[in-house]
């Protein structure tokens, strides 16, 4: 009897980008991001994400699109609160991990518009909700 190799788990990354794209599937074996499910396993998991979580992710994404370029004070407006934005985004990534469990890996990545995007740029959400630096 031969053992079948287990298929690699899909990798989902929460990373805001324009055009209402916030949930990315990593191309297998790379860190490249694609805006849609390019494997049957990823597509099946993505369809299983709760409507409530998808609504919250969509709302979070819209906040990004409205505010991303307010990184510095401009015309008397205060700089955008990136810390608050990331706190909510990470909370949503943790919720996604809770919904998907061990069936997928979940990452949170800061957008380039954040002046501090080079700090804790990409982190993986573990099953217990902890974050670890990702490569």
Image (spheres, grey):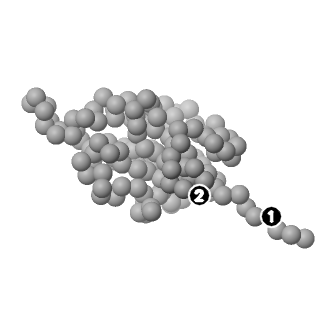
Q: Nearer the viewer, residue 10 or 98?
A: 10
User: Residue placed at 50% from the left, 60% from the top?
Assistant: 126
User: Residue placed at 38% from the left, 30% from the top?
Assistant: 62
Marked residue nearer the N-terminal end (2 or 1): 1
Q: Residue furthest right?
A: 1
Q: Please indicate whether residue 65 sits to the left or right of residue 32 in the image.
A: left
Q: Which residue, given by chain and number where applicable, does mark 1 sit on?
A: 4
- Assign the C terminus to one quadrant of the image: bottom left
User: Residue placed at 41% from the left, 63% from the top?
Assistant: 133
- So how many labels did they put on this image? 2
Q: Residue furthest left?
A: 76
**Does residue 71 appear in this view?**
yes
Is label 1 in a helix, a strand or a loop? loop
**Does residue 94 appear in this view?**
no
Q: Which residue, given by chain and number where applicable, does mark 2 sit on?
A: 29
Q: x and y percent of residue 108 in the render?
A: 43, 50
Residue 75: numbered disc: none
Gap in angstroms between the C-alphas marked 2 and 1: 19 Å
User: Residue placed at 34% from the left, 31% from the top?
Assistant: 65
- Pointer 1: residues within 10 angstroms few (<14), some, or many (20+)? few
- Assign the N terminus to one quadrant of the image: bottom right
């Amino acid at each position: 009897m031969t053992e079948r190799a287990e298929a690699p788990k899909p990798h989902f990354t929460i990373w805001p980008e324009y055009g209402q794209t916030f949930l990315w599937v990593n191309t297998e074996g790379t860190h490249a991001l694609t805006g849609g499910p390019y494997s049957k396993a990823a597509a099946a998991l993505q369809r299983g994400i709760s409507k409530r979580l998808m609504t919250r992710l969509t709302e979070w994404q819209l906040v990004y699109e409205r505010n991303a370029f307010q990184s510095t004070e401009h015309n008397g407006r205060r700089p955008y609160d990136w810390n608050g934005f990331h706190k909510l985004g990470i909370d949503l990534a943790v919720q996604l991990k809770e919904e998907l469990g061990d069936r997928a890996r979940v990452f949170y990545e800061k957008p380039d518009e954040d002046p501090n995007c080079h700090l804790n740029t990409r982190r993986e959400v573990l099953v217990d909700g902890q974050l670890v630096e990702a490569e």
